[in-house]
């Protein structure tokens, strides 16, 4: 078997720029909506009381991927990242492994990228300012991708002022209070989902919300009232209704399937997006394996074209 390339964190981020991630993730949603890419439901393996593991497979464009990734919310208190894991990218025609990749960087890039894809599709055409509530790993990549998509200046908010300030300095934005961040045209909530950061009283006409932090059962960043007051979109209904921002509202019987539109259908032009400039749109991102496939496939292309270096191993 040929030597297997292994991409570490830095190699992934060198291989795929935010602009390229946005383009690739957008294309992945279109392919999935067209039925060309497939993705079985992600499997959660709880590891109480610490967090959970997720197994996320997808197939498309002659490639098959499995991401084995975690969410351990208490990790930062011990100096460890919330999300870690490994991706195996294989040839879908013969099963041969083609590349191993650091899952943390791929996840960060594809999560940030979908924030930009959703904003470009659902925010008002004249939306410019961006607010980030929760400036950890995924909040930072959401901000970087929004900036790459032309949004900004923005406001970064985090109870850890130093992380908000560092992100704001990197992008030429500013740090501020939660109220400053949610006064933006596009607001991204990227907190651990352990407490409410957005209530119905925070909604303003014409704003767009990307709810990224609630990506598993029991997590929520907005109140049910707030969710109920929005025009609703999600990445994928099954995940969003069982382990996303919409889950509490679905469980409470406030939101049903017919009120929620999947992003891919909007991108494909087969479903309506924002109904008008006054609407408050909410996109629930739970994180899809097709997004990971989009980034891993771009990284494989970069390596094959000699644009990045990789370690190799023999199995
Ligand atoms: N939707 C997706 O595709 C997706 C992908 C990966 C991770 N996630 C989820 O996103 C969340 C954040 O992950 P991360 O890796 O960035 O974690 P992180 O620990 O790096 O960052 C979380 C940040 O939120 C801040 N925070 C905590 N409470 C806050 C509050 N009340 N208001 C504002 N900020 C607050 C923390 O200080 C921290 O900086 C997790 O729940 C994770 O599971 C979602």
Image: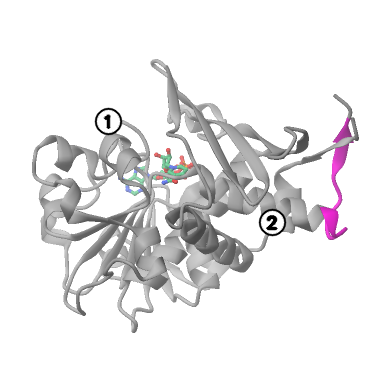
Mark 1: few/some/many CA within 10 Å (<14, 14-19, 20+): some
Residue that mark 1 sits on: 218
The label shown at residue 287 is none
Task: Please tell me whether the stretch drawn in magenta is mainly helix, strand or loop.
Answer: loop
Q: Would residue 93 be seen by someone viewing this image from the given angle?
A: yes
At horizontal 38% and vertical 44% (from top left) the residue drawn is 286
- Ligand 1 resides in the quarter of the picture at top left
Q: Based on the displayed image, in which of its 4 quarters is residue 176 positioned?
A: bottom left
100 left or right, relative to 305 = left
Q: Earlier in the sequence, mark 1 or mark 2?
A: 1
Q: Specify start and end residues of the magenta stretch as a single range.
A: 304-313
Does the magenta portion include 307?
Answer: yes
Q: Position of residue 172 (x, y in %)?
A: 53, 73
At horizontal 35% and vertical 66% (from top left) the residue drawn is 266
Does the magenta portion include 196?
Answer: no
Question: Mark 2: which secondary structure?
Answer: helix
Q: Would residue 244 be seen by someone viewing this image from the given angle?
A: no
Which quadrant would the C terminus be assigned to in this image? top right
Q: CA distance from mark 1 to mark 2?
A: 33 Å
Residue found farthest to the bottom: 126
Mark 2: few/some/many CA within 10 Å (<14, 14-19, 20+): some
Q: Based on the displayed image, in which of its 4 quarters is residue 18 positioned?
A: bottom right
Q: Position of residue 257 (x, y in %)?
A: 19, 47
At horizontal 52% and vertical 34% (from top left) the residue drawn is 56
Residue that mark 2 sits on: 298
Question: Mark 1: which secondary structure?
Answer: loop
């Amino acid at each position: 078997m040929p030597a297997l390339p292994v991409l570490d964190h830095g190699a992934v981020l060198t291989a795929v720029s935010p602009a390229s991630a946005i383009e690739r993730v957008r294309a992945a949603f279109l392919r999935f909506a067209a039925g060309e890419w497939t993705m079985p439901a992600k499997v959660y393996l709880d590891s109480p009381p610490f967090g959970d593991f997720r197994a996320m497979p997808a197939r498309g464009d002659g490639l098959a991927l499995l991401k084995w990734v975690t969410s351990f919310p208490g990790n930062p208190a011990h100096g460890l990242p919330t999300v870690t894991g490994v991706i195996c990218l294989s040839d879908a025609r013969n099963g041969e492994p083609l590349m191993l990749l650091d899952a943390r960087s791929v996840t960060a890039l594809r999560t940030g990228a979908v924030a930009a894809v959703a904003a470009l599709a659902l925010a008002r055409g004249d939306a410019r300012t961006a607010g980030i509530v929760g400036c950890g790993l995924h909040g930072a990549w959401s901000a970087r991708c929004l900036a790459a998509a032309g949004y900004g200046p923005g406001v970064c908010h985090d109870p850890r002022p130093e992380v908000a300030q560092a992100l704001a300095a990197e992008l030429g934005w500013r740090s501020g209070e939660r109220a400053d961040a949610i006064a933006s045209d596009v607001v991204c909530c990227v907190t651990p989902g352990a407490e409410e950061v957005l209530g119905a009283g925070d909604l303003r006409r014409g704003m767009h919300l990307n709810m990224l932090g609630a990506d598993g059962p029991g997590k929520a960043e907005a109140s049910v009232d707030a969710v109920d007051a929005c025009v609703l979109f999600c990445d994928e209904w099954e995940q969003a209704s069982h382990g996303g921002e919409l889950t509490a509202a679905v469980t409470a019987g406030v939101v049903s399937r017919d009120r929620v539109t999947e992003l891919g259908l909007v991108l494909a032009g087969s479903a309506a997006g924002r109904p008008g400039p006054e609407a408050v749109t909410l996109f629930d991102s739970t994180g899809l394996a097709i997004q990971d496939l989009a980034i891993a496939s771009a990284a494989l292309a970069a390596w094959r074209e000699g644009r990045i270096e990789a370690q190799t191993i023999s199995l």
